[in-house]
Amino acid sequence: MRYIRAIRLVNFRNYADASVVFSPGLNVVYGENAQGKTNLLEGVAFAASGSSPRTANDSEVVRWGAGFARAEMRVSLWSSCERRVSVGYAPGQRKRLIVDGAPVGSLAEYAAGAAGVRAITFFPDDIRIVKGAPSDRREFIDSLLSTLKPSYARAASEYTRAVQQRNQLLRRIRDGLSSRRTLDTWDRKVIQLGLTLLKERSGAFPALAEHFTRSLRALYGPEKAAVRYRYSTTPETYVQALRDAHEGDIERGTTSIGPHRDDLEVLLGGVNLTTYGSQGQQRLATLGLKIAAREFIRELAGEDPILLFDDVMSELDERRRRYLAEYFLGSAQALVSTTNLEYFEGETLSRSRVVRVRGGAILEVAKGEMSP
Ligand SMILES: Nc1ncnc2c1ncn2[C@@H]1O[C@H](COP(=O)(O)OP(=O)(O)OP(=O)(O)O)[C@@H](O)[C@H]1O
Ligand SMILES: [Mg+2]
């Protein structure tokens, strides 16, 4: 069973230099507002995947006034076998990704499990997966598939580039600077990469959707939840649809169909949660998607990803908190942050490790001191 033994954060957010040891099973990260709980979970995700799930701008994680940020981690692979990894970032430089002393060539490779553990994160902002734009939902599926296959991450970024180049060409054709014949070459390139994405996404979907339905039944109740993949064009109609769109695409200077225009539909009792969901329903559905992602990775990679769940207990009623606590206790490892230890039952806490965060310092709390 894989889990994180310890982490050290150097100049990461509000941590100058802090270390902490974790246990398998549930680890409760507790502290008052603005002490560093979210930052600690982000730091663990940074070490596990090579980048922050909260921001695309790496320099945000560098401690104010510092020149670099680094997260080092010890991962337990099995019995006494351990892996040491380190992710370092300095603005203007290439990221340093190191596994057992050796540099890893690419971020895509690192993100696809090189650290020895994969992480499923839940941050309060993630509610945008359900509530937000189609691009937020595509990012969810893309990052899930990228963590399983570096080749998916590569195809996705090549596809994005190909679409951008095709868009440039469309505008040149519109402005009379290029001929239409050149469009065929780019159509072929876009379709070839686009089909790779569609194949992987649609391959993942039945299993992912089933896990979602099941996890929402446990989290929410008997109303049937579903997630559906919404194609802008199916693999079968892709070639023809792209050709049919030529006129309009040239006029607008953008590529109007393909996997970069697809969406996920999240439904509860037949109601679209993106448009009509309550805050609580959207939050639970987001959680359901994350749990579905965990089960999906478990099935495919044969390993239990660690859960990094930030402030997940607030806004949930007691029954759902109890359900989640059991779920975390039964996982290989979960790091769950809270401002309030009372969200966990005494019995749950006695089976967990509790760490306290205060002003960028991390302290382990001895069992006797845990007084809610
Ligand atoms: N790059 C940075 N350098 C230094 N401090 C930072 C950086 N980024 C964020 N911080 C600060 O770190 C502090 C802790 O933030 P964090 O989000 O981890 O708090 P938290 O314990 O999760 O609080 P809450 O309970 O309110 O969610 C905040 O005051 C924040 O402004
Ligand atoms: Mg927080």
Image: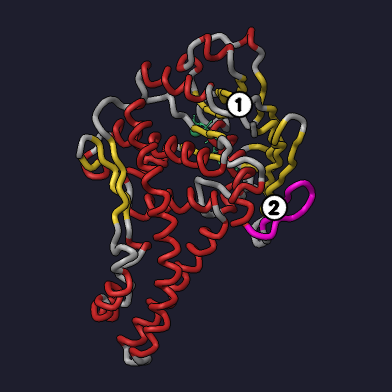
Q: Image quadrant for the N terminus?
A: top right
Q: Which residues are magenta?
A: 95-106
Most foreground residue, 125 or 221:
221
For label 1, the crowd category at 10 Å Cα-Cα, with few meaning under 14, some 14 to 19 and many 20 or more, is many
Residue 163 seen from this side: no
Query: Which residue is painted at 53% across and 21% down in the image?
Result: 329
Residue 42 x, y percent position in the rendering: 56, 40
Q: Are marks 1 and 2 in contact (CB under 8 Å)?
A: no
Residue type, numbered disc 1: Val
Q: What secondary structure is marked by label 2?
A: strand
Residue 230 x, y percent position in the rendering: 29, 54
Q: CA distance from mark 1 to mark 2?
A: 27 Å
Residue type, numbered disc 2: Leu
In the displayed structure, 158 sits above or below 136; it is below
Q: What secondary structure is marked by label 1?
A: strand
Residue at the disc numbered 1: 357
Residue 60 x, y percent position in the rendering: 56, 49
Q: Is residue 103 magenta?
A: yes
Most foreground residue, 33 or 105:
105
In the displayed structure, 145 sits above or below 41; it is below
Mark 1 sits near ligand 1, with its Cβ under 8 Å away = yes
Colour pattern: secondary structure
User: In the image as oriented, which residue stretches furthest toward the right?
Assistant: 101
In the displayed structure, 116 sits above or below 244; it is above
In the displayed structure, 253 sits above or below 48; it is below
Query: Which residue is painted at 66% across and 29% down in the image?
Result: 361
Residue at the disc numbered 2: 97
Numbered label tally: 2
